[in-house]
Amino acid sequence: LCIGSLAAGEARLAHIFQDNMVLQRDALVPVWGWADPGTTVEVAFAGQQVGAEADTDGYWKFVLEPLAVSNEGSSLEARIGDSTITRKNVVVGEVWLAAGQSNMNHSGPDLATGLYPHHVSSTEAGRPDVRITRFGAGAYLEPQADINPVERGQTLWTILPSNTVVKSLNIPTGFARLLRDKLDVPVGIIHVAVSGTNQGAWMHRNETKRNEQDFSHRGADERSLLDGALRRGSGEREA
């Protein structure tokens, strides 16, 4: 996501911030949204409170200090001018991005082949939640300021039921349960996989450009070596 003025003037949080979400533990946590330029904004969560003003584009952003693991849902509150937005049942744990193509959308398990195995917890009684949000189908060629819910649907966070074989997303949900069982912390999955995309679609543009340059240089070097070998071979035959 990039900073932008997609919805300047509308007092709101970015669409990733919804009820039942998971925030990353032990790391700085950005919280951002939009309002009228110059609007005073305050965000409160887990005993922290930060504030500033929306910039000339109406964009605002805060960074919460690293948060401790919490399986007990709390409220994240954003006071934006005269408006108050509350996101309920927010927990703190591990947050992972599930990207890629069709294999990240497949169902399972296929017990005969072992493909897309479904991890079954020995017990889920008292264990932290596994939660997931999906960004819908489709892709953009340029970074977006925020998710457009009209185009991609609402980015709601869902609490997965205990040990249920899901009809899709078997790899990310199985991974999430396995991670939750090992670490004993809430796990959140942000699912952005799009079927049919290639590896380069999920790489930073600077990285793909660097690789293109490396391959072009490698190609030139290989051609130079081949030309040299041909010249040497021709010279040896002439001799």
Image: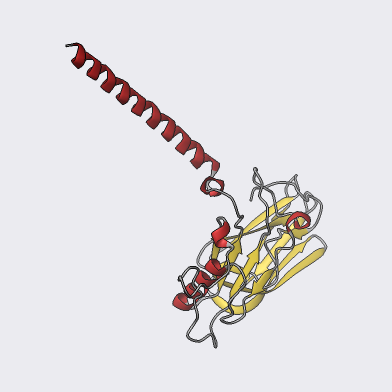
Residue 97 at what x, y percent from top left?
A: 56, 60
- Residue at the image position 60 percent from the left and 69 percent from the top: 22
Query: Compared with residue 77, is residue 236 higher up or lower down, i.e. above or below?
Result: above
Count every numbered label the image shows and give the total: 0
Dividing the picture into quarters, in which one does residue 172 lie? bottom right
Dividing the picture into quarters, in which one does residue 161 lie? bottom right
Front residue (pair 176, 113): 113
- Residue at the image position 71 percent from the left and 58 percent from the top: 14
Q: Residue furthest top?
A: 238
* Image side of residue 99 versus residue 37, left or right: left
Query: Compared with residue 54, is residue 174 higher up or lower down, i.e. above or below?
Result: below
Residue 227 in view: yes
Front residue (pair 209, 194): 194
Residue 13 at what x, y percent from top left?
A: 73, 60
- Residue at the image position 58 percent from the left and 67 percent from the top: 169
Query: Compared with residue 55, is residue 155 higher up or lower down, i.e. above or below?
Result: below
Residue 98 in view: no
Query: Compared with residue 191, is residue 207 higher up or lower down, i.e. above or below?
Result: above
* Image side of residue 177 versus residue 47, left or right: left
Residue 232 at what x, y percent from top left?
A: 23, 18
Q: Residue furthest left?
A: 239
Residue 92 at what x, y percent from top left?
A: 57, 72
Front residue (pair 91, 84): 91
Which color scheme is applied?
secondary structure
Q: Quadrant of the C terminus?
A: top left
- Residue at the image position 71 percent from the left and 55 percent from the top: 147
